[in-house]
Image (cartoon, helix red, strand yellow):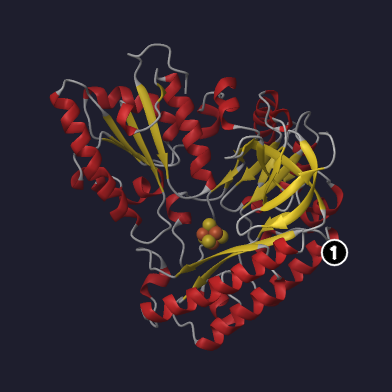
Amino acid sequence: MASPTRDTDPRAFIKSFGCQMNVYDSERMGDLAGQAGYAEAAGVEDADLIILNTCHIRERASEKIFSELGKLRELKEQRGQMGRPTMLVVAGCVAQAEGAEILRRQPAVDIVVGPQSYHRLPQLLREARIRPGVVDTDFPAEDKFSQLPASRLDAIRRRGVSSFVTVQEGCDKFCSFCVVPYTRGAEASRPAGAILDEIARLAGAGVREVTLLGQNVNAYHGVDRHGQAIGLAGLIRAAALMPGIRRVRYTTSHPNDMSEDLIDAHRDVPALAPYLHLPVQSGSDTMVKSMNRRHRVADYLDIVARVRAARPDIAFSSDFIVGYPGETDADFDQTLALVSAVGFASSYAFKYSPRPGTPAAEMSGQIDEAIKARRLAVLQELIEDRRQAFNRATVGRRLEVLFEKPGRREGQLIGRSPQMQSVFAEGPRSLIGALTVVEILAAEPHSLRGRIVSPAS
Ligand code: SF4
């Protein structure tokens, strides 16, 4: 979005829910709002255009959005009485899943737009000004990314030194619990040239770390500038060579798409950060099969071993679902055993909750909420214990930290280690955006405290 030039400029506020891809989409919607003449608002209070970029993954996601919309309707009505119109937009996966139902339940909404058609936002805004209540949840034939305006350099600079770049969207895996294949559609990869052009623009505005994003990012299968097929490993190698780019990350991956080439990239590309988020969901083969993950737990452990052989300092993280239909105490114990065996640096655990329209929602053997809650508490305690052990093991080591922003205390900087740990140290602001060697002095509950030992590189 543009910086406001006059107090009377219309302003837009985008509230992003859920995953990193939604964060990226929200930034691009900000670019589109800027193209449509909106400056950036600090919050809903001073916004003339309010966009909720929604997520459908969490429990009761739709209900939470309708509750939020109820409050925004009141705001819109109050402003309407003062002659100040406000435009309400629901975007993202709830918009895709609920479509016109959103307008039926909350008529104050002006636009419902899905994740595959938000590039049409300026046109939808024009339509909604004439006739509110526009719904666009198409999967259009045109390439969304080629229709998006390039981000303005000042907008990129405001985002900081680390940026997301969506390279792939959608998923063909159809895990039994997941709505993504329905809300984001089939796997589709952007052409490598367009991605590298975007990374070059980010680097030109001061970005030093890019995270290549996709719902199933390691299934990336694009074409290069010569029309030749290129996978994620090739894309990572090319991104790592871009002037100004010091670190490359990617997320989220499926175990079945961890190709040999990608594992080799962890060995061969120093700029590829030693951190891999590789969800396994359960340590029980019975559960993994029922989830339609199409691999065995042993396959997962084999991948972990091969990636570790390629890059011994790599940190792993995973997602886990507890209380999936049919999960027994023995299945759950196998999940605990897997967490201990891998030694994850961090992980996310969730109670299973049915998503309408997914096969798991119809399965017998749904687990009692109290059992789910107990298992979740046990698993989270183990994950936290492993995370702290991983962090303690870094005390006394020297890590290359990319400082991202000033800390809360005067003179403090906050950045990330290669393994994604949050690190803070005393240092000048000039180090923001530079890779700096930091000696780790202590592992605090949520971050590492360090001392800068080398000049920036
Ligand atoms: S691989 Fe991931 S995005 Fe695709 S269906 Fe499974 S959980 Fe959903």
Q: Residue 49 in the image: x percent, y percent?
A: 33, 28
Above or below: residue 406 compared with residue 346 = above
Q: Residue 10 in the image: x percent, y percent?
A: 34, 19
Residue at left 46%, top 75%? 324
Q: Answer whether residue 367 is visible to the viewer in this image.
A: no
Above or below: residue 25 compared with residue 68 = above
- Read off the residue under disc 1: 309
**Tally of marks:** 1
Residue at left 60%, top 63%? 347
Which image quadrant for residue 197?
top right
| Outermost residue, front side | 410
**How packed is label 1: few (under 14 Cα within 10 Å), some, or many (20 or more)?**
some
Numbered disc 1: secondary structure: helix
Q: Amino acid at mark 1?
A: Ala
Q: Dividing the image into 4 quarters, which one contains the C terminus?
A: top right
Nearer to us in this view, 179 or 22: 22
Above or below: residue 296 compared with residue 165 = below
Left or right relative to 204: residue 177: left
Which image quadrant for residue 79?
top left
Q: Answer whether residue 122 is visible to the viewer in this image.
A: yes
Residue at left 37%, top 47%? 96
Nearer to us in this view, 436 or 307: 436
Q: Residue 202 in the image: x percent, y percent?
A: 65, 28
Above or below: residue 171 compared with residue 454 = below
